[in-house]
Amino acid sequence: MNSLELHENSTGKLQTKSLIKIDSKEILSKVYTPGVGEVCLKIKEDESNLHKYTIAGKTVAVISNGTAVLGFGDIGPKAALPVMEGKAAIFSEFAGINSYPLCINEKDPEKFIQIVKSLALNFAAINLEDISAPTCFEIEKRLSDELDIPVIHDDQHGTAIVVLAALIGAVKITGKENLKIVVSGAGAAGTAISKLLVKAKKENLLSISEIKVFDSVGLIATNRNNLNAHKLELANLTMQNNTCSLEEGIKNSDIFIGVSVPNSITTSQIKKMNKEPIIFSLSNPIPEIMPDQAKEAGAIIVATGRSDFPNQINNALAYPGVFKGLLKSKIKKVSDKHKIAAAIAIYEYNLPSLAKDNILPSILDKNVPDIIAQSII
């Protein structure tokens, strides 16, 4: 059975189901009228009771406007719905979390924010997904600031958590220090990865001497006059003042993290990096360079976003456990502390099995969400 048949046969991947068996008038009167009126009045007296007595206390909204879907880009909210359904199915299967996909037909960030805010009372947390940069940054910040439930743009932070966990493992294997890191791609994932790496450096979690972030024009540096506010922030955070090309900037680096476009680096560029570099080639489904080519060029560890190669880096490894921990600990705002804790938890769990072709646990390992959730406090 192919994917289309799978989805057609079940008309999607989700359903709602009553948790209470309605098999008598007595139960019916408690579930619905008149008994439910008591619950309504309890919430009216104290609105915080909403999370105590209703589905809003345990449900995650998976929300998108379909402007940056997988490797397809802006394909619209209707075409994005299968992805949001898939995330909700993963929440259920791997973390036992109730969630619901919502695709909103609105590109204007202010209107999108207001729509989400009006819906937020129904949920315990919000997982933003597949929203294009740079508007995704504003949307996440505003919603996080203005709502009293946790809000995470998973393309940013879920990806960053898994990349950090993978990098800690790769560095443990290689023993590399004073890392010179190149990040190719300054969209949602590249920005979040870079910011979390800066934080990891400050926390002495990794020995990093330099982080260079590249977009399609070149190195994001303060002497460029075409930077938006988000990229200027990256230039200042990474302390880069003089731009250059990726071809020049990748020389003598130790680590390449690609979250950009397919086939965007070459074997000759990898050969110009320091000996036995680490290559995270995460463009999906076609990476920046294929693993066999990267290894032929001298890479010691290679990761991709794909499940058919070793070392898959995918945000699905992180977000079920992160949200499980947020809900369990009743955390309302997500911080770098939580992200780093999640990354360390993933790394430490995989440590007994750590190897060049096994720098992360499997996405299918159902112990991982619980391990992560325990770290989110």
Image (tube, rainbow, N blue to C red):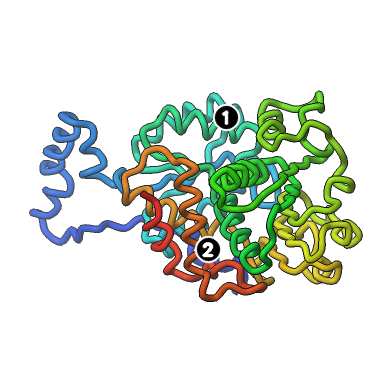
Q: Residues within 10 Å of mark 1 (few under 14, many from 20)?
A: some
Residue 246 got which mark?
A: none
Residue that appears at 65% across and 44% down: 194
Residue that appears at 68% across and 67% down: 174
- Judging by the rendered image, the residue that carries numbered circle 2 is 347
Check disc 2 and give the amino acid type. Answer: Tyr
Closer to the camera, 325 or 248? 248
Q: Is residue 76 visible?
A: no
In the image, is 171 to the left or to the right of 15?
A: right
In the image, is 292 to the left or to the right of 57?
A: right
Residue that appears at 84% across and 55% down: 265
Residue that appears at 42% across and 64% down: 93
- Judging by the rendered image, the residue that carries numbered circle 1 is 138
Closer to the camera, 349 or 82? 349
Picture coordinates of residue 165 (x, y %)? Answer: 56, 58
Picture coordinates of residue 56 (x, y %)? Answer: 31, 43
Q: Is residue 289 above or below residue 34?
A: below
Closer to the camera, 313 or 166? 166
Q: Which image quarter is the N terminus in?
A: bottom right
The local secondary structure at tag 1 comes to helix
Picture coordinates of residue 290 (x, y %)? Answer: 79, 65
Q: Is residue 280 above or below residue 197?
A: below
How many numbered marks appear? 2
Picture coordinates of residue 186 (x, y %)? Answer: 71, 41
Distance from disc 1 to disc 2, alpha carbons, whole Å, reads 31 Å
Label 1 or label 2, whichever comes before in sequence order: 1
Q: Which mark is nearer the camera, 1 or 2? A: 2
Q: Is residue 173 above or below residue 160?
A: below
